């Protein structure tokens, strides 16, 4: 399987991936493999965003 953007450095924002998933669903649904890959990428983005939000500025 080719690497996903999440495997290649900084992930795309979760909101961007979510919109891509929504667009595919509205267009008749993504292929199962494509959906799985997007779901993994979205989960990684959400985790990354939560980690960044938890880190405050240095004192």
Image (tube, helix red, strand yellow):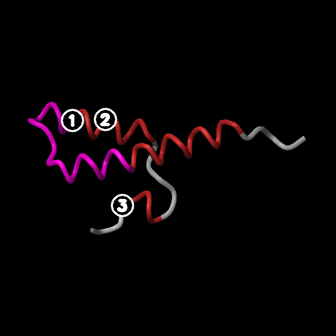
- The secondary structure that dominates the magenta segment is helix
Is 31 part of what is drawn in magenta? yes
Q: Residue at x 9, y 35 (%)?
A: 28
Residue 54 image position (x, y, % from top left)? 69, 37
Residue 4 image position (x, y, % from top left)? 36, 61
Q: Residue at x 33, y 44 (%)?
A: 39
Q: Residue at x 44, y 57 (%)?
A: 6
The span from disc 3 to disc 2 (Cα, nearest Å) is 17 Å
Q: Which residues are magenta?
A: 24-40
Closer to us: 49 or 40: 40
Is 12 part of what is drawn in magenta? no
State left or right for residue 31 relative to residue 13.
left
State left or right for residue 22 relative to residue 3.
left
Check residue 19 in the rendering and tell me which mark sits there, or answer none. 2
Q: Which residue position holds label 3?
A: 4
Q: Quadrant of the C terminus?
A: top right
Q: Is residue 40 above or below residue 14?
A: below
- Which of label 3 and label 1 is nearer to you? 3
Closer to us: 9 or 2: 2
Q: Residue at x 46, y 43 (%)?
A: 13
The span from disc 3 to disc 1 (Cα, nearest Å) is 19 Å
Q: Residue furthest left?
A: 28
Along the polypeptide, which appears first: circle 3 or circle 2? 3
Q: Residues within 10 Å of mark 3 (few under 14, many from 20)?
A: few
Helix, strand or loop at label 1? It is helix
The span from disc 1 to disc 2 (Cα, nearest Å) is 6 Å
Check residue 23 in the rendering and tell me which mark sits there, or answer none. 1
For the residues bearing labels 1 and 2, Cβ distance under 8 angstroms: yes
For the residues bearing labels 3 and 1, Cβ distance under 8 angstroms: no
């Amino acid at each position: 399987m080719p690497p996903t953007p999440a495997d290649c450095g900084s992930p795309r924002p979760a909101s961007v991936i979510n919109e891509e998933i929504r667009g595919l669903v509205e267009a008749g649904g993504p292929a199962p493999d494509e959906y799985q890959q997007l779901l993994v990428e979205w989960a990684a983005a959400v985790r990354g965003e939560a980690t960044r939000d938890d880190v405050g500025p240095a004192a």
